[in-house]
Amino acid sequence: MAEDPILVTRPYLPPLAELLPYLEEIWASRWLTNHGPFHQRFAEALREFLGAPQVSLTANGMLALELAIEASALKGEVITTPYSFVATTHAVRRSGLKPVFVDIKRDDLNIDPALIEERITPETSAIVAVHCYGNPCAGDDLQRIADKHGLKLIFDAAHAFGVRRHGKAVAVQGDYAIISFHATKAFNTFEGGAVISGDAAAKQLIDRYSNFGIADEVTVQAVGGNAKMSEFNAALGLLQISHFENARAGRRLADARYRSALQSVRGIEMIAIPEGLESNYSYFPVLVTEEYGMSRDALYEKLKANGVFSRRYFYPLLSTLPMYRDLESAAPANLPVATRAAEQILCLPIYHDLGESDQDRIIELVAR
Ligand code: T4K
């Protein structure tokens, strides 16, 4: 008999019975959206969980990033990484800005601060950095560069929910940071996201842009849009917070099993967990190098033929997409580390209840 397929992730869902009282509350109040009681409770719970000064909830991570860019009133050029999900660069471009790609570091696959300053011009207004797979960027170095050149600093922390370094939430940095609560993330509300901001005025800007620019019943102050989170998603989020550590613990085990089984496989490189980091273990990226003796794509196909659906996050490189490849900064010669990583990367399945026998199946296929 064919074995069950193993997908790259499996969303964590709380027991349905625990959600029902929340739904009954929504049904009774008929308050479904527009910053209702669950919205406020979830935002407050998140603020506490993250230790963040301010949190605004949004309909998803992409809109959160667009709001952060909009509230930062950027112009001209934005320095960013080509090695991310397409939402990152699209948010820059959809805001009428020009993305300027800077290469990444091999050790964490995040933007390389040492290469940023040579790309800064009088047109540059911000840096949009990504904590790829939840691994923290060199936040202090980025902040120093942003301060020196008067740039805004925005973190796409879509992957970094719950990640802490020396006890502090990695997502709480910069002028704004965004998180995604998409179904495939470490923490999900089906769809959802949040913007973290530093003070009440910054949060007010985000909240206003997210609600059509409306200040009160008769006052519209900005050309805003609609990025609000509904009461359903907020109620689910409130419940999910109480389950997060449990889900993280399941993924931590799977991560540790992969690391010990794959460390001796020639040609398979893993990304080290930096000292003091409490990851959320929501991705398990490996780099399939020349020494492996089989290309990344051949391994991907082999896994697929055996019912294991890994993903090539993040290939193709954003700078090679038709809408970006003509940018001067998109030249492959400018991005050798990212180009190589995109050709070698493979994210193996990882989730809270990945069974040991399923994981062994994956490990055997990779280790041969
Ligand atoms: N910035 C960064 C750095 C991001 O990575 C993302 C999103 C964003 C910003 C934007 O945040 P959001 O606007 O999405 O909140 C997925 C996600 O759709 C996307 O959220 C995520 N990053 C990206 C890395 O991955 P796909 O195209 O790979 O999703 P899909 O539908 O192929 O699903 C992957 C696997 O997950 C499937 O094989 C099965 C499983 N799955 C998926 C869904 C949707 C489930 O088991 N249940 C589900 O409901 O993009």
Image (cartoon, grey):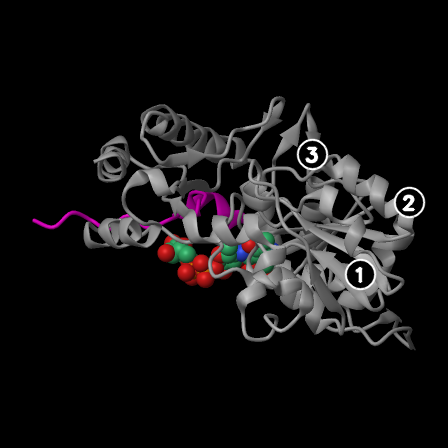
Q: Magenta stretch: give its range.
A: 1-26
Q: Quadrant of the C terminus?
A: top left
Mark 1 or 3, closer to the camera: 3
Q: Earlier in the sequence, mark 1 or mark 3?
A: 3
305 with respect to 111 (left or right): left
**Looking at the picture, how far across and down is residue 272, in whole percent?**
51, 29
Residue sitting at x 68%, y 54%: 102
Considering the numbered disc 3 on the image, is that residue within a helix, a strand or a loop?
strand
Residue sitting at x 61%, y 27%: 277
Mark 3 or 2, closer to the camera: 2
From mark 1 to mark 3, how far is it between C-alphas?
Answer: 22 Å
Amino acid bearing label 3 = Ala
**Looking at the picture, how far across and down is residue 7, in whole percent?**
33, 50
Amino acid bearing label 1 = Asp
Name of the residue lying farthest toward the left: 1
| Residue 273 appearing in the image | yes
- Image height check: is 144 above or below 298? above
**Looking at the picture, how far across and down is residue 20, in whole percent?**
49, 50
Tally of numbered tags: 3
From mark 3 to mark 2, how far is it between C-alphas?
Answer: 24 Å
| Residue 28 appearing in the image | no
190 part of magenta stretch? no
Dot 2 corresponds to which residue?
148
Considering the numbered disc 2 on the image, is that residue within a helix, a strand or a loop?
helix
Q: Earlier in the sequence, mark 2 or mark 1?
A: 2
Residues tagged 3 and 2 counted as in contact (Cβ below 8 A): no
Q: Earlier in the sequence, mark 3 or mark 2?
A: 2
Amino acid bearing label 2 = Lys
Q: Which mark is residue 16?
A: none
Residue sitting at x 91%, y 77%: 218
Dot 3 corresponds to which residue?
169
